[in-house]
Image: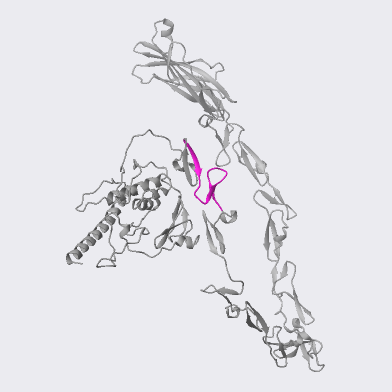
Amino acid sequence: MPTNEKQSMCSVAGKQCCLSSLKEIQCQSGMTSARRGDTCEGEEDRCPDDSHQVCCSCCALGLQVRSEGKGCEIHQFLGYPCGHIFLTCCEEEEGLSKVSLRRKPRPTSIPREDSEGTFPREAFAIGATDETANGVEEQKDVDECLLHAGKLCQQTCTNTWGSFHCGCYQGFILQGDGRLCAPVIPDEENRVKDFRPAAIPTITPATTTVDISTRTTTSRPVRINPCSENGGCSQQCLAVADRALCSCFPGFRLKRDGRKCEDINECVLGTHNCGVGFVCENTLGSFLCNHKPKCITGFSQDSHGNCIDINECLSLRELCSSGFNCINTVGSFSCQQKTISCSPGYSASSDGAKCVDLDECQMGTNRCGLGQICHNLPGSYTCDCQTGYQYDSLRKLCTDINECWRFPGRLCGQTCENTPGSFHCSCTEGFSLALDGKNCKDINECDKKPCSQECANIYGSYQCYCRQGYHLKDDGHTCEDIDECSQSIGSLCTFRCVNVAGSYQCACPPQGFTLSANKRSCKDIDECTAGNHNCSYDQSCFNLQGGFRCLSFHCPKNYNKVSDTRCDRISCNSLDCQNSPVRITYYQLSFQTNIIIPAQIFRIGPSPSYSGDHISISIIRGNEEGFFSTRKLNGYTGAVFLQRQVKEPKDFLIHVEMKLLRKGMLSTFLAKIYVFITSGAV
């Protein structure tokens, strides 16, 4: 080939390499723009190319389909590279890796060889757009998903040229190992997106053009989405006719409540596709196919698939007991007993592993005399007197030792009694023998509850005593209640004393009072504040000592009510109206029957008062029994007194009239006073 032709070929190859690298960079930039929601319009560049717009539009379409919860199967109708970009963005998760455009799918044709040219081993492209025809011939791809069905991925397996890719069903997320899937709760599936593609892209392999509107913002009426907050569904929610219908991810089924999903056990139902030689293992939302074991017990499978015998005798655990040898057999093992010879006074153990001492004392083969004790020794034995006996050399026998005489006052804490071969310690009344059998310990008689109430243990005896409010009877065991109410010198309670077992309680009147914190005096219940009264809406509640009253305050004719307790006369022309009181005021007073008489209970006077004012006061109504009186304190102040003792609770309504002479003008004021006398015994 001439030199100028070689330079031309190098120029073409360099240009193609540059364009391929530029396409990958611009495609990755387009996908990034689609993920950010940017526009997919083309960018100005010295080397113009539409890879940015194509990858951006196809990725944006994949993201939109995924956000609407639709399947990604549409990628097979889009062609290359748009279908590849669409599928990547449709199935992607957070934190995606870059997508390479340099690696094409499996080549569709074998590059033709120009055998007639100068360079017979070089391949040439037919045209600039027919990139697949110019690819280098590759080896035959292995479909790992088909070859290892059910073992590579937990849910879906997608074969790629030279490798494979694991995926998950919608609603699941691929884990860090790239194989397992875990369910997730979708939180943005029902959110309205800003990006809405106007049309399905039209792409051909030859021109790789895309017709997509990048961003459309329309104004639509707001509708309530029944699938907001996933519509109460545990997995998927589908809005149908303004209703939320729940559905489940593949591998799950809907429970009877119509909202929660439960895992489908494909292994139990027999809906798995595990072939012969595989065992089905259920997983959450899917299943796994595991190889069945090929070897029987006692054999293991080597790297070539052959079954070889296991030498159980080489294992760390002891298969045979001591005294036995382990013998390996084909597929198992056996235990053979060892043989051993022993010296006199010894014999072989039951397992034959060692020699053990013969206990002549227990076997009865010893020659010890009467009253002697046989003590076994390793390989032999010896004869001794029993404890508490000593050997009498004259009579050649063992005699009893009186330990109480030999060790007086040293063996027992209290009393020592000799017994054949030993001794016995005993204790006096109120004590018991300790665990050492020698000392005496005090008996806690209170454990047997000899007293009716409290018991105090003392050394060698006990003492009964009573709780507060009781006294001990003459029998020294029984406690009797003390009646504090009848025996008390002073007054224990302000109202009533009630004797109870071991104490007393103070009581209050059944109504209107409650017991104070000191548990002795009674405290009035304010029914008006607590709302425990039956006064009507137009009545006022007035609390009394031990009760309440419902009072009505009404203003008569020609008066205007200016407050809850005050009526002012309005302007009038008639003489009767002008002679009536200028003001009528209501008051409420409460006293107990034990009040000291005479007692000033009310004061009345003009406010403000001026020099030269003169008043006169009188009770014009309600004092028929003469319990009250009036007195003028000075020129402008008067008072009402309770002058007679009221012995029982009683209610009064007295009308006190005050006449004011000021600068020659005479005015009348009326005070209507409610006086409530309550019991003084509380």
Residue 212 location in percent, x, y? Answer: 31, 43
Residue at horizontal 48%, vertical 25%?
600
Q: Which residues are magenta?
A: 242-264
Residue 652 location in percent, x, y? Answer: 54, 20
Q: How is the image coloured?
A: one colour
Any part of residue 366 in sight: yes
Residue 215 placement: quadrant: top left
In this rendering, is residue 561 above or below 482? above
Residue at horizontal 63%, vertical 41%?
505
Q: Quadrant of the C terminus?
A: top right
Any part of residue 72 in sight: no
Inspect the magenta stretch and tell me whether residue 261 lies in it: yes
Q: Is residue 412 left or right of residue 314?
A: right
Outermost residue on the top side: it is 574
Residue at horizontal 34%, vertical 47%?
60
Nearest to the observer: residue 419 or residue 681: 419
Residue 143 location in percent, x, y? Answer: 44, 61
Nearest to the observer: residue 173 or residue 630: 173
Inspect the magenta stretch and tell me whether residue 180 lies in it: no
Outermost residue on the front side: it is 116
Outermost residue on the bottom side: it is 394
Nearest to the observer: residue 130 or residue 44: 130
Nearest to the observer: residue 145 or residue 292: 145
Q: Quadrant of the N terminus?
A: bottom left
Residue 587 location in percent, x, y? Answer: 47, 22
In this rendering, is residue 75 above or below 110? above
**How many numbered discs sit on the rendered protein?**
0
